[in-house]
Image (tube, rainbow, N blue to C red):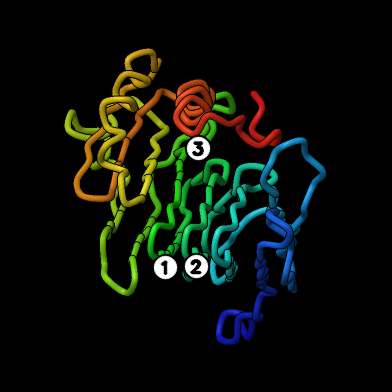
């Protein structure tokens, strides 16, 4: 009886990672690294021209009232790729929302690739995520975010849950792209105008002064894609959307698409 009146305060995960790069001798070099709590940033040795950062959530996933914060900054003429060690799992919530706040600052002439692996939404999960991007003159960014509603191979079904995902991209303080994804009723995704029987979906955004000029090239790449997909563009922004039966099919579509588009291999943690 007393436990019901005064429920115990559950331990919650807190994590923060800050990573900054600066140009030295014509190469992008680590300038700042801070990590706290359950969130770690690892810089593996690679054979790529630009550095790669892999974020690791040692909590093993996100539950209600967990909080992760990521801050990334690239100074002028630097470049780097950021990803995650594995898929991020969002578990059933007891009431509160798990939160992820990401801030990406891209200096003049810099190039950033944000390529985290998919986010798996479990039944009853509640996620609030915010992605804020600040671009400078002539800088560019490639963003990818993908979702998976349960794991098909495990026979999991997602019937309840909530997702609130907001993106804002600004260039020199001016808003150039904004998107808000809100899912309050998972069953509403089963309609013909939504996912139908599919469980996985993704959005890719490329923001660059000449991004709209790459539309036809991207559409040509998408013609060989094994998932439902489409692309559109306007001044300085290129966007592609993907829908697939499950995470494996989605990955088989995303990996060659992004590799062909950016003329570079995906991070090794993305291997099928």
Q: Mark 1 = which residue?
A: 134
- Inter-mark Cα distance, 1 to 3: 32 Å
Pointer 2 and pointer 3: residues touching (CB < 8 Å)? no
The crowd level at tag 2 (other Cα within 10 Å; few <14, some 14-19, many 20+) is many
Above or below, comparing residue 48 to residue 98 in the picture: above
Left or right relative to 117: residue 184: left
Identify which residue is drawn at 30% across, 54% down: 181
Left or right relative to 258: residue 57: right
- Inter-mark Cα distance, 2 to 1: 5 Å
x and y percent of residue 46 in the render?
Answer: 78, 39
- Inter-mark Cα distance, 2 to 3: 32 Å
Element under disc 2: strand
Q: Mark 3 = which residue?
A: 150
Instruction: Determine which quarter of the picture holds residue 36.
Output: bottom right
Left or right relative to 215: residue 92: right
Element under disc 1: strand
x and y percent of residue 23 in the render?
Answer: 66, 62
Q: Mark 2 = which residue?
A: 105
Above or below, comparing residue 28 to residue 255 in the picture: below
Disc number for residue 178: none
| Pointer 1 or 3: first along the chain | 1
Above or below, comparing residue 256 to residue 112 in the picture: above
């Amino acid at each position: 009886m007393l436990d019901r009146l005064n429920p115990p305060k559950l331990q919650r995960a807190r994590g923060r990672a800050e990573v900054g790069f600066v140009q030295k001798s014509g190469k992008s070099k680590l300038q700042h690294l801070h990590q706290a709590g359950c969130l770690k940033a690892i810089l593996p040795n690679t054979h790529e021209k630009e550095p790669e950062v892999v974020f690791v959530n040692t909590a093993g996933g996100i539950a209600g009232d967990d909080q992760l914060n990521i801050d990334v900054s690239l100074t002028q003429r630097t470049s780097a790729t950021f990803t995650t060690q594995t898929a991020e799992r969002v578990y059933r919530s007891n009431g509160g929302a798990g939160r992820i706040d990401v801030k990406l600052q891209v200096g003049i002439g810099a190039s950033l690739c944000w390529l985290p692996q998919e986010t798996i939404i479990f039944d009853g999960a509640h996620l609030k995520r915010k992605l804020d991007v600040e671009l400078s003159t002539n800088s560019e960014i490639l963003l990818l975010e993908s979702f998976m509603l349960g794991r098909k191979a495990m026979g999991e079904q997602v019937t309840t849950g909530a997702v609130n995902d907001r993106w804002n991209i600004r260039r020199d303080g001016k808003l150039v792209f904004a998107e808000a994804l809100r899912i309050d009723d998972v069953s509403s995704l089963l309609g013909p105008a939504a996912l139908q029987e599919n469980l996985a979906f993704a959005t890719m955004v490329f923001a660059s002064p000449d991004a709209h000029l790459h539309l036809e090239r991207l559409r040509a790449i998408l013609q060989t894609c094994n998932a439902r997909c489409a692309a559109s563009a306007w001044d300085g922004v290129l966007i592609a959307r993907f829908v697939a039966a499950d995470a494996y099919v989605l990955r088989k579509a995303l990996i060659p698409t992004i590799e062909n588009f950016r003329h570079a291999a995906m991070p090794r943690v993305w291997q099928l």
